[in-house]
Amino acid sequence: MKSGRGKGKRGGSGNAGLHKHKWNWVLKYDRNHFGPIGFTSHTQRRPDIPISLRDLSTQYENLVTKGFVTNDGKSATINLTNAGYTKLIGTGEFNIPSTIIVKKATEKSINKLNALGITVETDEQGNTEE
């Protein structure tokens, strides 16, 4: 009996070899056999949503109208956490006397604001980054 007339020389039965020697068959006839392209990341880390001092000064009136700023007459309290921001960055200038509540703040932004008499309250005390 010559070779290949029976069940021999098939390269495996079923789906055996689809990632090896039957790869061209997969590409030609069943491109989605191994699922969609890519993978799902299961990490829970979400990137910070930053706001700079420059952006804060330009968006201050918008934050007031949306209710994220409470004013008691002599100083304002700006709650950036409720506004959706998680980090305060020190680029630019902000000179409205206020107290800023945010999850994280860079040392540069804290030093700039403290020099002007503005208080920064971070939710995670001691978690300042540069």
Image (cartoon, helix red, strand yellow):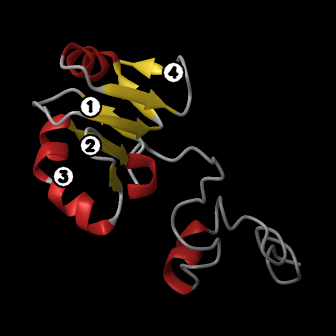
Q: Are marks 2 and 4 in contact (CB under 8 Å)?
A: no
Residue 122 % position (x, y) = 47, 30
Tag 1: Cα neighbours inside 10 Å, few (<14), some, or many (≥20)?
Answer: many
State the separation of the CA atoms marked 1 and 4: 14 Å
Tag 4: Cα neighbours inside 10 Å, few (<14), some, or many (≥20)?
Answer: few
State the separation of the CA atoms marked 2 and 4: 17 Å
- Residue at 26 percent of width and 46 percent of height: 73
State the separation of the CA atoms marked 2 and 1: 6 Å
Q: Nearer the viewer, mark 3 or mark 4?
A: 3
Q: Are marks 2 and 3 in contact (CB under 8 Å)?
A: no
State the separation of the CA atoms marked 3 and 4: 25 Å
State the separation of the CA atoms marked 2 and 3: 12 Å
Which mark, residue 60? Answer: 3
- Residue at 84 percent of width and 75 percent of height: 13
Please tell me which of labels 2 and 4 falls first in the chain: 2
Q: Nearer the viewer, mark 2 or mark 3?
A: 3
**Residue that numbered label 2 is attached to:** 51
**Residue that numbered label 4 is attached to:** 127
Please tell me which of labels 3 and 1 falls first in the chain: 3
Establish if 3 lies above or below 107: below
